[in-house]
Amino acid sequence: MTQELDKNASPKLGGLSYLNPAAPEPWASFIEQIERVRPYLGPLERWIETLKHPKRTLIVDVPIERDDGSIAHFEGYRVQHNLSRGPGKGGIRFHPAVTLNEVMALAGWMTIKNAAVGLPFGGAKGGVRVDPATLSKGELQRMTRRFTSEIGLIIGPDRDIPAPDVGTNAQTMAVMMDTFSMNRGSTTSGVVTGKPIALGGSLGRQEATGRGVFIIAREAGRHLHIPQEGARIVVQGFGNVGGIAARLFRAAGAKVVAIADHTATLANEAGIDIPAAQAHAATTGGLAGFAGATPIDIEDFWQTPCDYLIPAALEGQITPERATRIQARVIVEGANGPTTPAADDVLHKRGILVVPDVLANAGGVTVSYFEWVQDFSSFFWTEDEINARLERIMVSAFDAIWLVAQEKQVSLRTAAFIIACHRVLEARAERGLYP
């Protein structure tokens, strides 16, 4: 995801504020989701507390010298939630609203996500509480290097592998890789994923999360007999997840009727020209001012009739109150934690299918896994090979989760958590406790 929060954005026509004071703390939402799986764990229930306690939490001070000679301090985090199935894996977020509570939850969701799709990783996440837009290019690089040095104690290609997230990108990963390599004394390309291609990045990585959202939405539609041709799509968030998913939907013959980012909320019943909207956003920094759609109220956005609603911004967006007004057949979570547990219950009672984040947006970490493997072997695949492998893993994971949901008569989210928790806790049980 690449959307940034604008705390001053209007909740009406102009911008879209992603702050939601009505939503529960992210970690509380994660714990509630874990508790809902307890009845399905059998003998593994004795290990469930493992998932409620992050293995390792690092809080660091990140001081830098500003361009004017003053010293600024930022607070950074790296949380390793669970490493039972392999090294930690999860993004780095630069955002003014980053908190330890949020990073803990995001790390927990990464544990579940990696296990749900069968990747040999544990869950981790990191972040710095900073608005990168307020830093010069030099200041941002110095902050990234200092943060990398501070968390270098616990990251590494066989320990914990960061990746891009909100407010970070391939260039951020390049700086992190270089800093880690300089401190180690040798080039270590596998310490991060999401790197530029020239530094060992993988083809297809930038589009992977959005492509995964599209694949999973297509599979859900297949089960519900929703044809792609002519389907109505609503997308919140217009970066590397929402924007790419919207483009792929349009290419498949669907009609994107509403989009939103941190600058504007727009609609067009005739369908929005997504490549034109992407070009506008790339040039101006957001959707505001795009002539191919009409500004609408944010609450009207949430109740736009559609076949697929794609929340692809930040967590806590779909509250119980919004859930009562959503008019979608399927919600495919491109963001992490966009739906609160209480809202999940409302949507379930209304018969709206929710495809959970831990499945829907797993395309990014799946291709990050491919990148990690390619870096270790120094042998790189074509983009067609990447996309084919991605599709195979995503479709297989969806089918397994759908089957569990049908067998146990639970939501897709609970089914995904059942599969993931069994895998993580079985690994924990087999390894035992040391000493």
Image: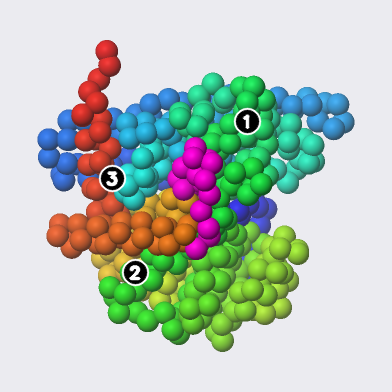
Residues packed near mark 2 inside 10 Å, few (<14), some (14 to 19) or many (20 plus): some
Q: Secondary structure at mark 2?
A: helix
Residue annotated with mark 1: 187
Residue 433 in percent (x, y) is at 25, 20
Q: Are marks 1 and 2 in contact (CB under 8 Å)?
A: no
Give the Cα separation between the discs numbered 3 and 2: 20 Å
User: Residue drawn at (46%, 48%), measured in percent from left and top?
Assistant: 370
Q: Secondary structure at mark 3?
A: helix
Q: Answer above or below: position of 118 versus 247.
A: above
Horizontal side of residue 197 vs 112, given as left or right: right
Q: If you read the primary sequence from the N terminus, does the residue marked by circle 3 or circle 2 appear first? A: 2
Horizontal side of residue 174 vs 340, given as left or right: right
Q: Quadrant of residue 389?
A: bottom left
Instruction: Tell which of 211 and 393 is nearer to you.
Output: 393
Residue 181 in percent (x, y) is at 63, 28
Q: Amino acid at mark 2?
A: Glu
Numbered tag placed on residue 219 in the rendering: 2
Residue 234 in percent (x, y) is at 50, 72
The secondary structure that dominates the magenta segment is helix
Q: Answer above or below: position of 297 versus 203.
A: below
Q: Amino acid at mark 3?
A: Ala
